[in-house]
Image (cartoon, rainbow, N blue to C red):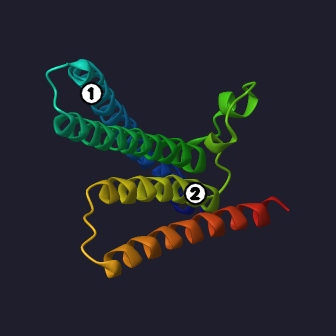
């Protein structure tokens, strides 16, 4: 009976290695999103030569500026999403497989990449996801049309909620440090 229990416990413990599939998939997705955002950035930068054209009217220049700012926000969103996937992959690996010695011993290594608990992973992901939401709100605000004062009030309320979310996330971070 003891050997069956030992075999089962060994099997159960080693089953955590299934998480490697999620780590590899998250890394692959991070690379894919990073690639797409970089291609988008390259394309956006390559089209900026049109902005200097003397044949461009003021309205067309303003439309190109607005479109470019929207693309910049989308690119930032892509890079933030790649960051979420990377942090998620590193966190899963550290929590379920093994500590990443290079991350803890590297001079100048970012503390955001060192995950000690599930709460650490959730907190770090929440911060990056909050930044993605802020970028998405900004992207939405660029195309927003204010028809009356109520629209402006809703927009201001959204900004206030984003500010409150940022304040609460920083307040919780300060509380965890003590």
- Between 108 and 74, the one nearer to me in the picture: 74
Characterize the local packing of mark 1: few (<14), some (14-19) or many (20 or more) Cα atoms within 10 angstroms: some
* Residue under pointer 2: 6
Marks 2,1: beta carbons within 8 A: no
| Image quarter hosting the C terminus | bottom right
Please say if 178 is above or below 17. Answer: below
Badge 2 element: helix
Badge 1 element: helix
* Residue under pointer 1: 44
Residue at image coords 53%, 41% = 90
- Between 106 and 160, the one nearer to me in the picture: 160
Quadrant location of residue 65? top left
- Between 99 and 173, the one nearer to me in the picture: 173
Residue at image coords 37%, 73% = 152
Residue at image coords 53%, 60% = 126
Please say if 144 is above or below 18. Answer: below
Residue 64: x and y in percent read 22, 35
- Farthest residue to the right: give it: 178
Residue 105: x and y in percent read 75, 28
Residue at image coords 71%, 61% = 173
């Amino acid at each position: 009976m003891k050997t069956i229990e030992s075999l089962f416990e060994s099997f159960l413990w080693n089953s955590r290695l299934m998480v490697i599939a999620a780590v590899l998939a998250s890394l692959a997705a991070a690379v894919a999103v990073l690639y797409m955002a970089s291609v988008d950035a390259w394309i956006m930068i390559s089209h900026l030569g049109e902005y200097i054209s003397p044949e461009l009217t003021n309205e067309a220049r303003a439309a190109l500026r607005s479109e470019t700012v929207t693309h910049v926000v989308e690119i930032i969103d892509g890079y933030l999403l790649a960051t979420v996937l990377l942090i998620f992959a590193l966190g899963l690996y550290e929590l379920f497989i093994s500590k990443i010695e290079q991350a803890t011993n590297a001079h100048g290594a970012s503390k955001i990449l060192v995950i000690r608990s599930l709460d650490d992973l959730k907190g770090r992901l929440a911060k990056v996801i909050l930044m993605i939401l802020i970028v998405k709100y900004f992207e939405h605000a660029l195309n927003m049309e204010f028809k009356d004062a109520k629209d402006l009030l809703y927009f201001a309320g959204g900004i206030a909620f984003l500010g409150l979310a940022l304040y609460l996330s920083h307040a919780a971070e300060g509380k965890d440090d003590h």
